[in-house]
Image (cartoon, rainbow, N blue to C red):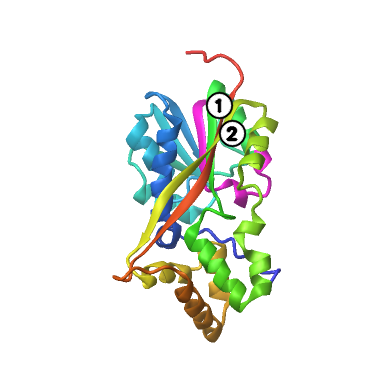
Amino acid sequence: MAEQDFDVWTAGDAYERYMGRWSRLVADEFVAWLACAPGARWLDVGCGSGALTSAVARRCRPRTLLGVERSAGFVSAARTLGSPRALFARADAQALPVGEAAVDVAVSGLVLNFLPDPGAAVAEAARVVAPGGLVAAYVWDYAEGMGFLRHFWDAVTAVDPSSAAELDEGRRFPLCRPAPLRRLWSEAALVEVEVAPIEVPTRFADFSDLWDPFLAGQGPAPGYVASLIPAARERLREALRQRVPARADGSIALRARAWGVRGRRAGVVDR
């Protein structure tokens, strides 16, 4: 199990069914929290299928807006699903194709914990932001705040405890908590650092609406499901079905929490 890579993020359409519908909700709340003035130059690092980029375009009236993403599949999805006001390009978060002090705001959504060196990515974002500019990001609170994933890994614990201990994002991603995020921003020499919770509802029409996206193979939990033989997959499905709190009409109402972090590059804005 340890030799398998379940952190697969390549297909934008599959991601939309699994996590994209919730990432779009949290992106909107995150951009509202930033409360940036119109006319800024924006960079979305690890833009995925374009959820955060679209929220920026809709809410912030940016002067320029560039989304960069390492996955060709996600860049294609972003160009289809994202805002027509944005440009998209393939690039690594740890080696941005942008000059120093070239943007006013650099943001990142649900990416940091999947990078091999998050500190290098934050430092790179700080490099490309102008003095006084903003570097901000958000990550899911996998340990305590993601209701449907918490139920999923609790179900895995019931049927396959060794895999749960190894793969549960709540254990794997200690970065996704306020103190480590604050420390990461401070180590990049960013100032006025703030961390805040961002919560959104995750409502499923029925159990199939919750379970079927786990079959798409995009991300750690769906990657694990894809590795199972049919009988084991069915045992997990039933264990999860018994755990989630369904309403009388079959719908399931849960919550998802992300942690947002923001800080500024020291210096005075030169306009």
Position of residue 30 measured from the top left corner of the image (x, y, whole percent):
44, 39
Say if residue 213 shows up in the picture. Answer: yes
Q: Is residue 121 left or right of residue 254?
A: right
Q: Residue at x 51, y 56 (%)?
A: 146
Q: Residue at x 68, y 36 (%)?
A: 183
The one nearer the camera, 154 or 261, is 154
Is 211 left, or right, of 1 in this rendering? Answer: left
Task: Report the side of 184 relative to 212 (left or right).
Answer: right
> Is disc 1 in contact with disc 2, using a CB cutoff of under 8 Å?
yes
Q: Is residue 53 above or below residue 1?
A: above
Please, what is the three-letter code of the amino acid marked with disc 2? Ala
Q: Which range is magenta? A: 102-120
Q: Residues within 10 Å of mark 2 (few under 14, many from 20)?
A: many
Residue identified by numbered label 1: 129
Give the Cα separation between the discs numbered 1 and 2. Answer: 6 Å
What x and y, as percent, mark residue 236? 53, 77
Q: Quadrant of residue 5?
A: bottom right
Check if residue 244 falls in the magenta segment.
no
Of residue 56 and residue 255, the one placed in the foreground of this image is 255
The amino acid pointed to by label 1 is: Val
Residue at horizontal 55 percent and vertical 44 percent from the top: 91
The residue wearing badge 2 is: 125
Position in image of residue 84 (x %, y %): 33, 41
Residue 3: quarter of image: bottom right
